[in-house]
């Protein structure tokens, strides 16, 4: 019986590996699960991209849910998700807020002029300091924040049509269904 | 297929370039002790974006930003634990190369000890059995044929 | 030379491997000599076709055949010819072809040198090697074909990853694979023994040089990889406990245990079950390493591109081979205590204890490496396990081994007299403590450094004491048989290694500095003076090259040239400059100019002072040398079955034990 021990331990490992392979097909192995889910979004105060003397803070956005999309003109994958966001913005159900991350304002504005601007509101974090509070480590990343300012959902990587249909929209629907 | 391949290649090369450049950034440390403390701390923290690199060695933009943030916090007089706590709150335990000791990681930290104890038990039993056989044996286990004092 | 011929060659090799594995096994089972006789020719045939396939791929690289996708992905017209050959194993598909080539190298050697083994046993051993070949050839043909075409053919290839364009990296995979694959011989032996129900002492003796050789190659591969990481990656480190590094280290640790267990079984006939189990573990960990690196299950800087289909294939293969052998072990391993008994104070006990530590260390590395995956599976959140974990537990586990090591040769088989042990303890112990105390003054009381000095003296004196004993007591010509000389070398290597690690870790100095040309920094008694940056070119790169002059008390010691290279596809690679030394390395890595538009202005750079870091690889090389020397012992090549009293006990067929 004792001699079966190595075999048993090994088969447990096989199960673990099988799980690992399966898990990888469903998850981005490079994505970190955000510790901020179901926690209040961090306090922030950032200038608008087009009106830099106007500041937008977290309290300004309370009362209405929004999808915060972190992007930059330097980010290739943001270009991939941009058409999806543009197409979905009108029927999203929540405001689409653009968070321009680590970008020179001129570059960002040029990029938006070229690719279109689907954002209801655009704020800019040129240095990237506030983004750290959100746990952002790259672009694109998107946060669904509810009316009370709590982060309900986060997606790392571009929002493809698939992700929009299978994850983002259902998350928004679930959030909206809850009575305030 | 080939278009996806090219994108993948581009990503790999980009990644390779980023991953293997140095994170060389002289910072205005107050003294040597602070510099050493910074080096040790950033060597224990993981870059959230890279493929298994420390904050000390990664050249990714987020690693740069986090290093600057850590430096700022050190200037503010925060302790190592406070700095780690700050990062874990935002990036989860992923950023700690030194896994915290908790219920989840009990298996990790105590597992080797358990294996050692179990193994030691097996070895002890084995030695006892052999020892018993040795004392029972009339002819003492002695040198082999080609022996010249220590049986090779 | 069309690449499709390469693919055809692999298909033929697979068919021959199937013949090589199935027919002799059936033959051995049925006592059919004709079927058993298929083993050697089939293996030879497989080797021919695999060599052909490999040659065709090398040809494709040398002749810039970018119509082959793998060639296009891993080379380009500017790549020098020696790196074009290295590019053959620069990525997943080609490295697998290298693996199967090396498997055939070992198999051919096995065929050639196994003529004196009983036919039934030998045919089983060759058949098991064939089974492994079947798995890898099938994997290559079905999921990782290096001969696929890329049409339309590009004008120029991508390039070999610049990080791989280095001699160390060229050398590292072949050496590593020689080690991994070499463990398959001991593995095949054990399986053949389990299948046949017998494991004769003489056969274990026959397997020992193969195992020692494989382990020596693995040591070389690991040292090459560590050296490359230090020289190429510019972070001044030599080991990161990265999953891929761990994948090579686990078989190494178990290999050490295996070598010692084989010694016991061969000489005393005991610990047969342990030897069999360890040989299964060693090779299983080699296969596991292959899985980990290519399945995407773990994140690493080093991993090949992940593909779930490939991961699944290897997993199934792994389950069949390892699961099958462990099941076979559970059913057929010897149950009755064989061989000569031994007392508590004996060499056997010392080996058992150190084998325990090595096995637990390997288990610890496995646990730490897999734990992030466990964290995902059990929903514990994302957990990273890195150097603070491994670097803490590994020395703890190895400390008992280091303490026991000098006693090993002095202990006798079976039973040892205490006075001899006490003598060693006193002499080596006092020397070690004395040197440690002296060292304390030189190293500012750093405990790690003191421990390093103490360890080297403890181990070194232990080796010297034993060598002296042999010199005194044994007539010339028989003093240092190769097996023993190898042991002494390897054990000394451990001491050298430990010193290197502890001193370099505790006494290194690293500084990030900003310097304008003419400015100097003072580190550890050396002055590093920055003398500006020039533009320069190489065979397939252009670079900004810095000049740093190192002075000591005003005398120029050396001039260093760190570079920032740009390769054809735009990849930027930092080529650090290292000034090697026996007691210290000086190391400079060039960063960025403070102002990107002014290359004549200030530059950021990282300066390292690394004392005794070369001792780490020197120690590793000594260990490798020890393995090679041991493998060459004449005793292992005796053609006749040795008739000693051990044989009677150990050759008791395992079948009886099952009764």
Image (cartoon, coloured by chain):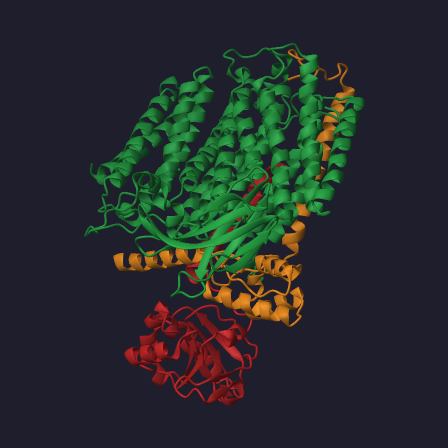
User: In the shown orientation, is residue C232 left or right of residue A2?
Assistant: left
Q: Is residue C331 visible?
A: no
Q: Return the x and y of residue B77 as percentages of the image width and height.
A: 67, 70
Q: Is residue A38 above or below residue C262?
A: below
A31, B51: nearer the viewer: B51
Location of residue C16 by image quarter: top left
User: In the shown orientation, is residue C521 left or right of residue C136?
Assistant: right
User: In the shown orientation, is residue C447 left or right of residue C176?
Assistant: right
Location of residue C598 by image quarter: bottom left
Give the color of chain C as drawn. Answer: green
C71, C576: nearer the viewer: C576
Q: Return the x and y of residue C438 as percentages of the image width and height.
A: 74, 38
Tell me the residue at 57%/12% (across/down): C642
User: In the shown orientation, is residue C453 left or right of residue A99?
Assistant: right
Among the chains, which one is red?
A: A
Q: Return the x and y of residue B124 as percentages of the image width and height.
A: 73, 34
Q: Is residue B33 above or below residue C466?
A: below
The single residue placed furthest to the left in the displayed view is C152
Q: Is residue C620 above or below residue B134?
A: below
Tell me the residue at 77%/15% (across/down): B138
Q: Quadrant of the C terminus of chain C?
A: top right
C623, A40: nearer the viewer: C623
Among the chains, which one is orange?
A: B
Tell me the residue at 49%/37% (across/down): C324
How many badges with numbers are in the image? 0
Q: Return the x and y of residue C392 as percentages of the image width and height.
A: 65, 49
Q: Quadrant of the N terminus of chain C?
A: top left
Q: Is residue B70 above or below residue C390?
A: below
Tell me the residue at 51%/67% (across/down): A33
Q: Is residue B94 visible?
A: yes
């Amino acid at each position: 019986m004792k001699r079966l021990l190595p075999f048993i331990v090994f088969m447990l490992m096989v199960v673990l590996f099988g799980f690992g392979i399966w898990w990888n097909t469903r998850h981005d192995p490079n994505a970190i699960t955000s510790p901020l889910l179901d926690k209040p979004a961090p306090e922030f105060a950032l200038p608008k991209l087009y009106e830099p003397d106007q500041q937008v803070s977290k309290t300004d956005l309370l009362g209405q849910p929004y999808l915060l999309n972190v992007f930059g003109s330097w980010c290739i994958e943001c270009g991939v998700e941009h058409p999806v966001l543009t197409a979905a913005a009108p029927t999203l159900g929540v405001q689409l807020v653009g968070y321009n991350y680590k970008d020179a304002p001129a570059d960002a504005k040029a990029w938006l002029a070229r690719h279109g601007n689907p954002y209801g509101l655009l704020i800019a974090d040129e240095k990237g300091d506030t983004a750290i509070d959100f746990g952002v480590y790259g672009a694109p990343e998107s946060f669904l924040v509810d009316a009370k300012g709590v982060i309900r959902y986060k997606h790392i990587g571009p929002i493809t049509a698939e992700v929009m249909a299978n994850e983002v929209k259902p998350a928004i629907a679930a959030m909206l269904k809850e009575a305030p | 297929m080939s278009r996806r391949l090219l994108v993948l290649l581009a990503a790999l090369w980009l990644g390779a370039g980023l991953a293997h450049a140095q994170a060389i950034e002289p910072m205005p440390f107050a003294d040597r002790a602070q510099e050493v403390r910074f080096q040790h701390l950033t060597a224990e923290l993981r870059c959230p974006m890279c493929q298994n690199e420390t904050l000390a060695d990664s050249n990714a933009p987020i690693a740069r930003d986090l290093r600057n943030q850590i430096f700022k916090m050190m200037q503010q007089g925060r302790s190592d634990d406070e700095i780690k706590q700050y990062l874990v709150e935002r990036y989860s335990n992923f950023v700690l190369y030194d896994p915290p000791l908790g219920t989840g990681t009990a298996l990790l930290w105590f597992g080797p000890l358990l294996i050692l104890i179990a193994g030691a038990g097996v070895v002890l039993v084995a030695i006892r059995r052999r020892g018993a056989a040795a004392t029972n044996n009339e002819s003492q286990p002695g040198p082999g044929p080609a022996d010249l004092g220590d049986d090779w | 030379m069309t690449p499709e011929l390469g693919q055809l060659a692999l298909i033929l090799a697979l068919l021959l491997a199937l013949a090589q594995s199935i027919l002799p096994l059936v033959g051995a089972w049925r006592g059919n000599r004709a079927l058993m006789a298929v083993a050697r020719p089939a293996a030879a045939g497989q080797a021919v076709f695999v060599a052909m396939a490999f040659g065709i791929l090398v040809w494709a690289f040398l002749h810039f055949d970018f119509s082959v996708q793998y060639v296009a992905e891993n080379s380009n017209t500017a790549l020098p010819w020696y790196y074009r050959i290295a590019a053959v194993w620069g990525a997943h598909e080609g490295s697998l072809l290298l693996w199967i080539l090396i498997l055939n190298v070992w198999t051919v050697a096995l065929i050639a040198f196994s003529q004196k083994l009983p036919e039934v046993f030998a045919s089983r051993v060759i058949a098991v090697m064939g089974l492994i070949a079947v798995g890898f050839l099938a994997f290559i043909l079905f999921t990782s074909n290096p001969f696929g075409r890329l049409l339309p053919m590009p004008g120029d290839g991508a390039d070999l990853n610049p990080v791989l364009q280095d001699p160390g990296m060229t050398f590292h995979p072949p050496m590593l694979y020689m080690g991994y694959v070499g463990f398959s011989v001991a593995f095949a032996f054990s399986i053949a023994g389990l299948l046949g129900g017998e494991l004769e002492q003489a056969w274990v003796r026959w397997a020992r040089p193969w195992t020692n050789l494989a382990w020596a190659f693995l040591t070389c591969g690991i040292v090459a990889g560590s050296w490359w990481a230090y020289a190429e990656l510019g972070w001044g480190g030599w080991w990161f406990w990265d999953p891929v590094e761990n994948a090579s280290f686990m078989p190494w640790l178990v290999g050490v245990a295996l070598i010692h267990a084989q010694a016991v079984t061969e000489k005393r006939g005991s610990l047969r079950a342990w030897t069999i189990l360890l040989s299964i573990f060693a090779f299983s960990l080699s296969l596991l390493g292959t899985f980990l690196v290519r399945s995407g299950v773990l994140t690493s800087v080093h991993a090949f591109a992940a593909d779930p289909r490939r991961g699944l294939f290897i997993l199934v293969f792994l389950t069949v081979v390892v699961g099958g052998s462990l099941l076979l072990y559970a059913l057929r391993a010897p149950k009755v205590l064989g061989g000569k008994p031994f007392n508590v104070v004996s060499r056997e006990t010392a080996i058992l204890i150190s084998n325990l530590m090595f096995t637990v260390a390997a288990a610890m590395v496995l646990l730490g490496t897999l734990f992030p995956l466990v964290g995902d599976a059990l929903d514990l959140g994302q957990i990273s396990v890195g150097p603070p974990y491994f670097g803490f537990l590994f020395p703890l586990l190895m400390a008992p081994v280091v303490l026991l090591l000098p006693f090993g040769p002095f202990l006798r088989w079976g039973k040892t007299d205490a006075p001899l042990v006490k003598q060693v303890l006193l002499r080596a112990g006092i020397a070690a403590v004395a040197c440690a105390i002296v060292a304390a003054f030189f190293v500012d009381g750093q405990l790690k450094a003191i421990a390093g000095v103490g360890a080297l003296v403890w181990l070194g004196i232990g080796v010297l004491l034993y060598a002296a004993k042999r010199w005194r007591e044994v007539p010339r010509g028989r003093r240092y048989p190769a097996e023993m000389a190898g042991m002494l070398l390897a054990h000394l290597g451990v001491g050298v290694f430990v010193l290197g690690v502890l001193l370099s870790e505790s006494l290194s100095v690293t500084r990030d500095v900003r310097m304008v040309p003419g400015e100097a920094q003072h580190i550890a008694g050396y002055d590093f003076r920055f003398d500006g940056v020039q533009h320069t070119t190489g065979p397939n790169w252009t670079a900004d090259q810095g000049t740093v002059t190192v002075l000591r008390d005003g005398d120029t010691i050396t001039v260093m040239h760190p570079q920032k290279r740009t390769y054809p596809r735009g990849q930027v690679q930092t080529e650090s400059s290292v000034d090697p030394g026996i007691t210290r390395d000086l190391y400079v890595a060039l960063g960025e100019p403070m102002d990107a538009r002014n290359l004549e202005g200030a530059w950021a750079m990282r300066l390292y002072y690394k004392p005794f870091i070369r001792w780490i690889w020197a120690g590793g090389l000594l260990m490798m040398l020890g393995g090679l020397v041991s493998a060459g012992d004449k005793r292992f090549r005796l053609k006749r079955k040795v008739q000693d009293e051990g044989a009677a006990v150990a050759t008791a067929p395992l079948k009886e034990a099952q009764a």
